Image (spheres, rainbow, N blue to C red):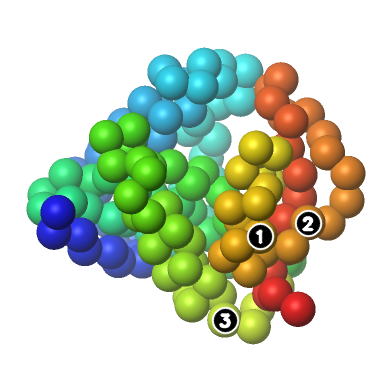
Amino acid sequence: MKIRLEIRAFEELSRIDLHDLLALRSRVFVVEQEITEEPEVDGLDPQAHHVLMWDDDVLVGTTRILLQRDPIKVGRVAVAESHRGVGLGSRMMRAVGEFLGPRSAKLHAQCHLESWYESLGWRRNGSNFDIVGISHVRMDWPPG
């Protein structure tokens, strides 16, 4: 594997980048997880910075960061099925943490991933709640 990771503002994405990140998110959230109630293309991508992780020329991971929110919102964390279980999601989220630094941020984690996010420095905030039939929990950054 030859992994490359970048964080870009929406305006810095090529049309291919945008196509590939929307296709990856669709595969992960709509096809694999069968999330159909919440639109994947929700109009917020133009306001976001996007984490792009490639294996050679293939996009295998993506996340978006909405900097204009208070706190900043991180979401749409997706890794291609073919590249899970080898630490790439952790690598991507560590890059998000470095990008955020001391700025406050939140994300809505699927509950089964809570301990993974905690291992990366995120902290639970509140009770579980439901989003489109999947149990989630709010996680906050920065650690400590």
Q: Which residue is mark 3?
A: 101
Q: SS class of the residue under badge 3?
A: loop
Is residue 14 in sight in this rendering? no
Q: The residue under label 2 is which amino acid type? A: Arg
Is residue 84 in sight in this rendering? yes
Q: Which residue is mark 1?
A: 118
Residue positioned 74% across, 30% down in the render: 135
Residue 130: quarter of image: top right
- x, y (%) of residue 110? 65, 38
Most foreground residue, 96 or 36 = 96
**Mark 3 crowdedness (10 Å alpha carbons): few <14, some 14-19, many ≥20:** few
Most foreground residue, 45 or 115 = 115
- x, y (%) of residue 134? 69, 26
Residue positioned 61% across, 25% down in the render: 38
Above/below status of 130 relative to 47: above
Residue positioned 57% across, 65% down in the render: 120
Residue 124: give its label. 2
Q: SS class of the residue under badge 2?
A: strand
Residue 137: give its label. none
